[in-house]
Image (tube, rainbow, N blue to C red):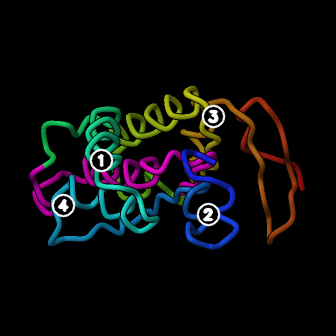
Amino acid sequence: VNGYSLERIRKREIPYMRRTVGVVFQDFRLIDNKTVYENVAFVMRAIGAREREIRERVPYVLNLVGLDTKSRRHPGELSGGEQQRLAIARALVNNPSTIIADEPTGNLDPAMSVEIMELLQEINNLGTTMLVVTHAQNLVEQFANRTIVLNDGVIVSDGMDGYYSYEN
């Protein structure tokens, strides 16, 4: 699975969930005393990736999210949008089949929110399943994909047109 043998996963040498699901948090959850590169490499090291793999994969992912020129900076030196891009890079670096993004635009201005959603759409177009949790109705309608609306834990709407509203 994604470069690791099923035998190693079965032996719990590689935590399976960390390999197959990436998570993007609203509050970024970055390590302040590590550089952009080190923040992303840290996630690979957590699953036991080899240094050679890290040296190859991290620059590729940083380029994908538009942070390739900021690899030596620390999170505090980045804008909010750049910090969210770094959080996305961390979620993406282990090549997960699914990324869960919890309010990924919650701390961003409207223009940056659209850029982040476009990046998530691009990642989805490359084959990664994206589950985006948001209250931003305008973004849901603008990025018209499958939209599931929950009310008190109950699915009240499930459609393919990005439609956010539902009838009680």
- Give, as a three-letter code, the residue at label 1: Arg
* Mark 3 vs 1, N-terminal side: 1
**Magenta residues (range):** 72-101
Q: Secondary structure at mark 3?
A: helix
Q: Position of residue 29 (x, y in %)?
A: 35, 69
Q: Is residue 151 left or right of residue 78?
A: right
Instruction: Identify the residue at image location x=26%, y=45%.
Output: 55
Q: Position of residue 88 (x, y in %)?
A: 41, 49
Instruction: For marks 3 and 1, give the CA distance.
Output: 42 Å
* Mark 2 vs 3, N-terminal side: 2
* Residue on which disc 4 sits: 75
**Are the residues flagged by discs 3 and 4 in contact, CB closer than 8 Å?**
no
* Residue on which disc 2 sits: 8
Instruction: For marks 2 and 3, give the CA distance.
Output: 42 Å
Q: Is residue 70 left or right of residue 91?
A: left
The quarter of the picture where residue 127 lies is: top right
* Mark 1 vs 2, N-terminal side: 2
* Mark 2 vs 4, N-terminal side: 2
* Mark 1 vs 4, N-terminal side: 1
Q: Is residue 79 above or below residue 64?
A: below
Instruction: For marks 1 and 2, give the CA distance.
Output: 19 Å
Q: Position of residue 154 (x, y in %)?
A: 86, 65
User: Is residue 73 part of the magenta span, yes or no?
Assistant: yes
Please identify the quadrant where the C terminus is shown: bottom right
* Residue on which disc 1 sits: 52
**Are the residues flagged by discs 1 and 4 in contact, CB closer than 8 Å?**
no
Q: Nearer the viewer, mark 1 or mark 4?
A: 1
- Give, as a three-letter code, the residue at label 3: Glu
Q: Secondary structure at mark 1?
A: helix
